[in-house]
Image (cartoon, rainbow, N blue to C red):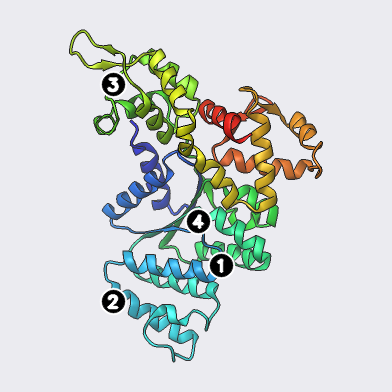
Amino acid sequence: MHHRKAQRDALLRKLTAGINVQMPAPRRIGKTWTINRLAGDLTAAGWIAVEVDVQGIRTTDSFARILCKRIEAQMPSKERFKTHLLQRLKNLTDGHWGDNPLDVLGKIDPIEFAETLVAALDDDGRPAAIIIDEVAYFFLHLAEQNAKDANAFAYQMRAMQGRYKNVRWLLTGSIGLDPVARRYGLQGAFVDLETFILDPFTAAEARSFLRDGAIQEALTHKFDASDEDFDYLFQELGWLAPFYLKLVANAVRPSGYAQTNGNAIAGRQDFDDAFTTLLQPNRRSEFAIWREHIDKNLPASDSRLASEILSRISQDSDGETFDTLLASLATNAEPKSRGELRDIIAILVNDGLVSKVDDRYRFRSGLVRRYWKEYEA
């Protein structure tokens, strides 16, 4: 149940039907694992699957370079593709730059170079999928540096989706395209993408994951638990992402044994003890990625506001309403507008840190909330 087969099959059907997809998925939910397996599914079905991770890529030139390398790496007939690409590039230039396609960058616009790559991929004849991970971060950083370049690239990407029918696009990211597009006026560039949500595990999927033999073999102490006790763990954890399920499971020291086969059995107290263990000072590194993620991947002003929001909602498991958040943040030296606050909350929701329950914003994970309150607030 936990291998995301239903979701992978649905994505394959959509791509086969000619639908281009954006898949926002919070961090630590298994997005990268899922798209890696989807790429394998596509290859098995006769597709060319090109995976590109653009987190940390901040220019159109760098984007074009990594896209070129990834397409070349996935082409079954690399030399034929290279010859075809070189001919297309020579038609756009004077041709005096050797036989490495990347040498032409600097002679033509990187956006035009990227389209030439996609055109050559389209001409191969086989169905192809370009899977771009963390695309929202790319456009966020590009727009911060040069809003004109971001606009030109986003709309050219839309044009390519309509122009080259053998090539499908799957754009994924942990913060989602919507808040970035709205801030920088790029909404129209992504209007043709169908949204596909990759949700956290259900309780049934989470139990299947924790009982998987390969997962159990990798744990410090193998164990099982009743469905009811697992449900208690899931309620306390609050965010059934594979990373956190395994993190807690690794800290469990089962105190019981099954009467029939002698296998180790964990109960509620064992799960409570695991939470306590994970929140000790020597385990802070298990959660530090969240602070690092916010500091590195958001502009400085957004990072500061995101940290303020998280610190505020970490104080109570029920979180805060939008208005109480706005009022509390307005006491700082730099008052926050409603629009600015909504944009950052949207990023935190898409990123998996925050969820909205009724009219309140709160941490998705009770474990991460307790960490943030203890060490970051």
**Amino acid type at mark 3:** Phe
12 vs 315, left or right, is left
The residue sitting at 45% across, 38% down in the picture is: 29
Task: Return the residue at label 4.
Answer: 55
Q: Quadrant of residue 363?
A: top right
Give the x, y percent position of residue 148.
67, 67
Figure check: 270 above or below 68: above
Residue 26 shows in the view: no
Q: Residue 223: which disc?
A: 3
Q: Residue 59: which disc?
A: 1
Q: CA distance from mark 3 to mark 4?
A: 37 Å
Q: On the rendered image, what quadrant is the C terminus found in?
A: top right
Figure check: 33 above or below 133: above
Figure check: 228 above or below 362: above
Q: Quadrant of residue 80?
A: bottom left
Mark toward the start of the polypeptide (3 vs 1): 1
**Amino acid type at mark 2:** Glu
Q: CA distance from mark 2 to mark 1?
A: 28 Å
What SS does tag 4 mark?
loop
Q: CA distance from mark 3 to mark 1?
A: 48 Å
Residue 120 shows in the view: yes
Q: On the rendered image, what quadrant is the N terminus found in?
A: top left
What SS does tag 3 mark?
loop
Q: Given this view, does label 2 or label 1 mark the residue nearer the observer? A: 1
Foreground residue, 332 or 214? 332
